[in-house]
Image (spheres, rainbow, N blue to C red):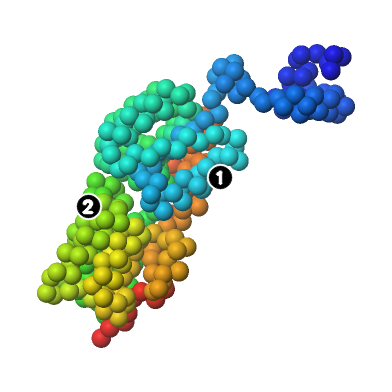
Amino acid sequence: MTELSISTVSRVLNGKAKQYRIGIKSQQKVIEAAKKLQYVPNHFAANLKSGRSGTLALIIPSLNNPFFANIASEINIELRKLDYIVIISDSNENMETEKKEIQQLAARNIEGLIIVPCGDQWIHIKELENKGIPVVCIDRYFENLDIPYVSTDNFEGAFRATNYLIENGHKHIRCIQGSQSSTPNRLRVDGFCDAMKKAGLKNYEISGNNFTFENGYLETKLILQKENKPTAIFTFSNTIAMGCIKALREENIQIPKDISLITFDDHPYLDYLSTPLSCIAQPVSNISKMAVQFIYSKIQNQQIDISQVLLKPEMKLRSSVNKIN
């Protein structure tokens, strides 16, 4: 190795051999020596020199929610292709936690943030963008804010699910919603109500306050206490649906014989339930890929022609909805 200069070794180890026309033999010598010495690049030192951290952050409301866990996995895969490290943070659906996480992540010199906001407050997110750190919202977003976002057409998804229940003869439908402060939830409520009103149906109720198993379980228990039970329930997430199913089983109510069930959000386990669950599936992979494309374009200071996108959901019909007279 003594016949190779320090600059030559550095260029090979930093992947710049082709740029500086360093010969194959010289490259091999450097690589073999690095292997023998078990050399590991000091990215921190390199980042100090380049001004880049090679790190992006992702904040989601809950890693316990399969939908958000799926988003985290997809985004991590896509950013790894671009040689970025991803710091994944869980806000636990708590606004103060979200604000604190953003402060701490900004101090780590992140190059950008992809976030599923947990509420309707946005000033702390906009302040981060004003500091020059690109931000992209995913799934949840702020309609009147100029921050890029990628989400699903939640209104259409809820309208289609409700209309499917109506087409199968259901007139008494209960809806269990999630976090009332999130834009997707509000649009799902609008889609549900619009479908019911257009069908001339007034016998419906909406309850619930978060996207958890417990919410689905408790709200279903309350629904079943009423004398006039619904013929169908529409849950706004598969986590709510799981809580709902548990409550129905405890009361010996069969799906779909006694009560039909449809939910927002797909997951492979829905196929393996004793009664496979019909759902509105969000295009998680495409949402994640587009969000990564947006954040990378902003980091590269590239112009984004369309930066606020709603993708079409897909209705997956299984066996949880019964046709009634």
Residue 174 placed where, x, y %?
Answer: 21, 67
Which quadrant holds residue 6?
Answer: top right
Image point 34% across, 39% down: which residue?
Answer: 91
- Residue 25 appears anywhere in the view: yes
Residue type beneath disc 1: Ile
Pointer 2: what residue?
Answer: 209
Quadrant of the rendering where the N terminus is positioned: top right
Mark 2: give few (<14), some (14-19) or many (20+) Cα within 10 Å: some
Q: Nearer the viewer, residue 109 or 147?
A: 109
Q: Is residue 300 left or right of residue 122?
A: right
Image point 74% across, 21% down: which residue?
Answer: 11
Q: Element at badge 1?
A: helix
Residue type beneath disc 2: Asn
Q: Is residue 71 above or below residue 280?
A: above
Q: Earlier in the sequence, mark 2 or mark 1?
A: 1
Quadrant of the rendering where the C terminus is positioned: bottom left
Residue 115 placed where, x, y %?
Answer: 39, 39
- Residue 315 appears anywhere in the view: no
For this orientation, the residue located farthest to the bottom is: 325
Image point 39% across, 59% down: which residue?
Answer: 265
Image point 55% across, 44% down: which residue?
Answer: 78
Residue 189 placed where, x, y %?
Answer: 24, 58
Which of the numbered marks, if any, corresponds to residue 77?
A: 1
Number of numbered discs present? 2
Q: Element at badge 2?
A: loop
Q: Are marks 2 and 1 in contact (CB under 8 Å)?
A: no
